[in-house]
Amino acid sequence: MKLAELFNGEKTVFSFEVFPPKRDKPIKTIYDTLDALQDLQPDFISVTYGASGSLADNSTCEIASAIKHKYGIESAAHLTCVNSTKAEVTEVLRRLADNGVENILALRGDLVPDMPPKKEFLHASELISFIKEKDYSFGISGACYPEGHTDSRSQVEDILNLKKKVDAGAQHLISQLFFDNALFYDFVDKARIAGINVPIEAGIMPVTNKKQIERMVSLCGASLPAKFTKMMSRYENKPEAMRDAGIAYAVNQIVDLLSCGVDGVHLYTMNNPYIAKRICESVQSLF
Ligand code: FAD
């Protein structure tokens, strides 16, 4: 099933993101994670793609295929392009199609230090056009940024570029993480005014330790509201309290998003079923 078809008004979509295990960990670890996540019955699970773009580094296809065929949950494979050639992307598309993966989250990807970009794709919209030309009939999703992408000079410029991505064929968008729902609502309003009419899922990351969030925020530039930084300062040296406060913060964000009629919530699980379970137990009946 194409992800866009899930947004049919019957229920608000609730999805998860997982990442393939690091190279030094056995692939089995992700299946232990998926065994636990399966019970939470998300509408789909997406699987990230290594930033290097290297096929050898990526078990994304295998995991996305298993989610769909072994676990019976719809899946999406992330695919980046800036560090890949068209021939390499063509090979990944063939593999995804051969393995019955139906959905792709098409991304530019970040530039990797010491790895010059291949320059065959400059933006996600070019990857989307390329996938459509290949005519595999994948469902195609794209990323969006409630606070603007860090490369953009302004949010307006970023939203105009987002429109190009949707015009190229993205049927559904998943947002970067954010901690202030007001920024997300403002972004969605502007996107709608710009004529972006596809479903927009809100990306929610439960914060469970200070280091994790400092790393994420330095990468993606999400702003931290005062109530969030106060929470981190108060509990940073108490791991259990920090975890519980992070879960409660994510639950509050989700309740507010659902009350305001969000199209969907995409939970960055960080491959941590315990935290996903705690969140689901609090909000599952609200979807
Ligand atoms: P683009 O849509 O190409 O946008 C990047 C920048 O270029 C923006 O500033 C945009 O305004 C501008 N731009 C876009 N189109 C044009 C155009 N036509 N002309 C001029 N400027 C343009 N990274 C990974 O490596 N692996 C993953 O699995 C992964 N998953 C992600 C999932 C989500 C939900 C999100 C939000 C991000 C993910 N990322 C992942 C990170 C992502 O690769 C980076 O944020 C990357 O820097 C931008 O990717 P993009 O697809 O949004 O790029």
Image (tube, rainbow, N blue to C red):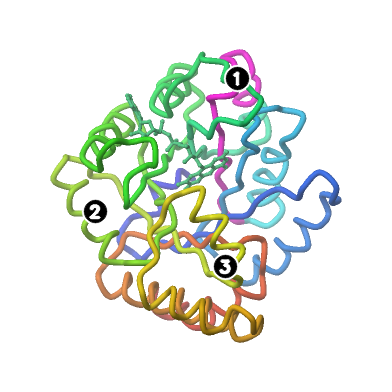
- Which mark identifies residue 153? none
* Residue designated by label 2: 188
Closer to the observer: label 2 or label 1?
Answer: 1
Circle 2/circle 1 CB separation < 8 Å: no
Q: Position of residue 125 (x, y in %)?
A: 38, 27
What residue appears at the point 61 percent right and 31 percent down from the top-left corner?
Answer: 112
- In the image: residue 170, left or right of residue 39: left
* Residue designated by label 3: 41
Q: Is residue 278 above or below residue 144?
A: below
Per the image, label 3 sits on a secondary structure element best described as: loop
**Quarter of image, res 263:** bottom left
- In the image: residue 140, left or right of residue 242: left
Q: Is residue 92 magenta?
A: yes
Per the image, label 1 sits on a secondary structure element best described as: loop
Please name the amino acid that badge 2 sits on. Answer: Val
Badge 2 crowding class, 10 Å Cα cut-off, few under 14, some 14 to 19, many 20 or more, is many
Please name the amino acid that badge 3 sits on. Answer: Gln
The furthest residue to the left = 193
Q: Position of residue 137 (x, y in %)?
A: 47, 29
Q: Quadrant of ligand 1?
A: top left
Which region shows up in magenta?
Answer: 73-94
Earlier along the polypeptide chain: callout 3 or callout 2? 3
- In the image: residue 82, left or right of residue 191: right
Earlier along the polypeptide chain: callout 1 or callout 3? 3
Q: Quadrant of the C terminus?
A: bottom left
Disc 1 to disc 3, C-alpha distance: 40 Å
What residue appears at the point 64 percent right and 18 percent down from the top-left corner?
Answer: 88
What residue appears at the point 60 percent right and 21 percent down from the top-left corner?
Answer: 84
Q: Position of residue 105 (x, y in %)?
A: 49, 39
Q: Could you say which is closer to the camera, residue 67 or residue 230?
A: 230
**Quarter of image, res 243:** bottom right
